[in-house]
Image (cartoon, grey):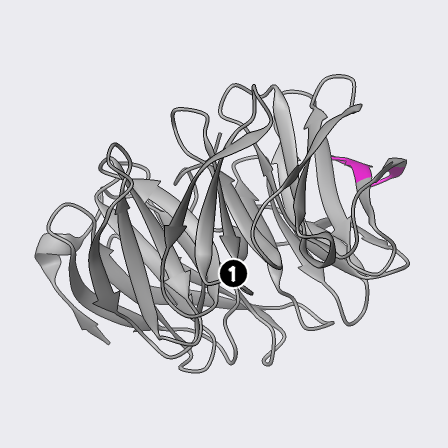
């Protein structure tokens, strides 16, 4: 591990990284830069949502969703779903967990405590990433094979609109100001969506195969899988102001609670890369398990609505 102490976030930030190949969850202390625990998670986990009420993982191979206690890391609940569970997002106020079903064009709606299935929502083909807006009013699904984003009223769960974006959208996340940023792996760009008008207001070219998006310091950070880079977008001008080299095949990306640090999961390198979000410098890396994906919100408190 190589780590710069100047880049360390405030004490207490933890990263929970799903390792698909190794079938584990790596727990990283971002304050010390240490791997502190490795928890078995059968079924090749990929999707993740870390919250003080539970660490939620999605294992597509076994079709299993689990809720772990954040402190003891014991399994509090689990459920086996059909289809192809992939992405995951939590609505902490309404105590709902959403899981995308890649094969059946739908979202599962689960009780956040028991993981009991309560409802399904129709999406476009092959839904992947899911996100909840900062104000808790809008739920978004990236429907990869439909080249669209589905937008739902998070209270009623009714479909409000379907917005055409770039080709093969996969990861997405809401900016602090409520705009939705969508990574399109087929067109190597990011669609910026105004959810109120259900329209794309800008398209930003980034690197090869953009996957995940996170926000800090008035900027969007986008992982580019095939380029082994992170594109940095200024949120006011929407210009790409920097491109940073990270580990091989970066996927999941998230921010520390204080916005000082960006963390990327490098699937082919078995590491996370640490980026100083203010100085736009790579400051180190931490080893993980085999095949880190971290698809979702994986830093406790970082960028969580």
- Judge from the rendering whether residue 10 lies leftward or rightward of residue 294; answer left or right: left
Total number of numbered discs in the rendering: 1
The boundaries of the magenta stretch are 109-117
Residue 110, relative to residue 245: is it above or below? above
Residue 96, relative to residue 149: is it above or below? above
- What's the residue at 68%, 73% (across, down)? 44
Residue 288, relative to residue 242: is it above or below? below
Residue 174, relative to residue 76: is it above or below? above
Counting from the top left corner in percent of width and height, residue 109 is at 80, 37
Is 115 contained in the magenta span? yes
> Dot 1 corresponds to which residue?
294
Question: Which of 131/181 is in front?
Answer: 181
- Judge from the rendering whether residue 253 lies leftward or rightward of residue 61; answer left or right: left
Quarter occupied by residue 162: top right
- What's the residue at 56%, 26% (across, down)? 195
Question: Which of 166/242 is in front?
Answer: 166
Counting from the top left corner in percent of width and height, residue 225 is at 44, 71
Counting from the top left corner in percent of width and height, residue 24 is at 58, 71
Question: Which of 301/230 is in front?
Answer: 230
Q: Is residue 64 visible?
A: yes
Mark 1 crowdedness (10 Å alpha carbons): few <14, some 14-19, many ≥20? many
- What's the residue at 72%, 31% (across, down)? 96
Is 245 contained in the magenta span? no
> Which quadrant, please, contains the N terminus?
bottom left
- What's the residue at 72%, 40% (across, down)? 98
Q: Is residue 142 visible?
A: no
Counting from the top left corner in percent of width and height, residue 90 is at 63, 36
- Judge from the rendering whether residue 109 lies leftward or rightward of residue 49; answer left or right: right
Q: Indicate the secondary structure of the residue bearing disc 1.
A: loop
């Amino acid at each position: 591990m190589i780590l710069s102490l100047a880049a360390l976030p405030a004490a207490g930030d933890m990263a929970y990284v799903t390792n698909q190949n190794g079938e584990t969850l790596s727990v990283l202390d971002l304050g010390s830069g240490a791997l502190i625990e490795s928890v078995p998670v059968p079924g090749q986990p990929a999707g993740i949502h870390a919250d003080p009420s539970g660490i939620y993982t999605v294992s597509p191979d076994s079709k299993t969703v689990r809720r772990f206690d954040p402190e003891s890391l014991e399994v509090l609940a689990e459920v086996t779903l059909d289809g192809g569970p992939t992405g995951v997002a939590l609505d902490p106020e309404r105590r709902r967990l959403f899981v995308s079903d890649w094969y059946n064009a739908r979202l599962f709606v689960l009780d956040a405590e028991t993981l009991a299935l309560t409802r399904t929502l129709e999406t476009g083909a092959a839904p992947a990433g899911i996100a909840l807006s900062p104000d808790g009013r809008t739920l978004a699904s990236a429907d990869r094979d439909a080249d669209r984003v589905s937008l739902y009223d998070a209270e009623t769960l009714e479909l409000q609109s379907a917005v055409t974006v770039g080709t093969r959208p996969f990861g997405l996340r809401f900016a602090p100001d409520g705009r939705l940023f969508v990574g399109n792996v087929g067109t190597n760009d990011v669609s910026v969506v105004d959810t109120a008008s259900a329209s794309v207001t800008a398209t930003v070219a980034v690197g090869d195969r953009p996957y995940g998006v996170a926000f800090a310091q008035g900027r969007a950070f986008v992982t580019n899988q095939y380029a082994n880079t992170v594109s940095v977008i200024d949120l006011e001008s929407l210009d790409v102001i920097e491109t940073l080299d990270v580990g091989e095949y970066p996927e999941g990306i998230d921010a520390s609670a204080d916005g000082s640090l960006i963390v990327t999961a490098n699937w082919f390198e078995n590491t996370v890369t640490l980026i100083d979000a203010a100085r736009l410098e790579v400051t180190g890396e931490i080893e993980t398990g085999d095949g880190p994906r971290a698809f979702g919100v994986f830093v406790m408190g970082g960028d969580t609505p």
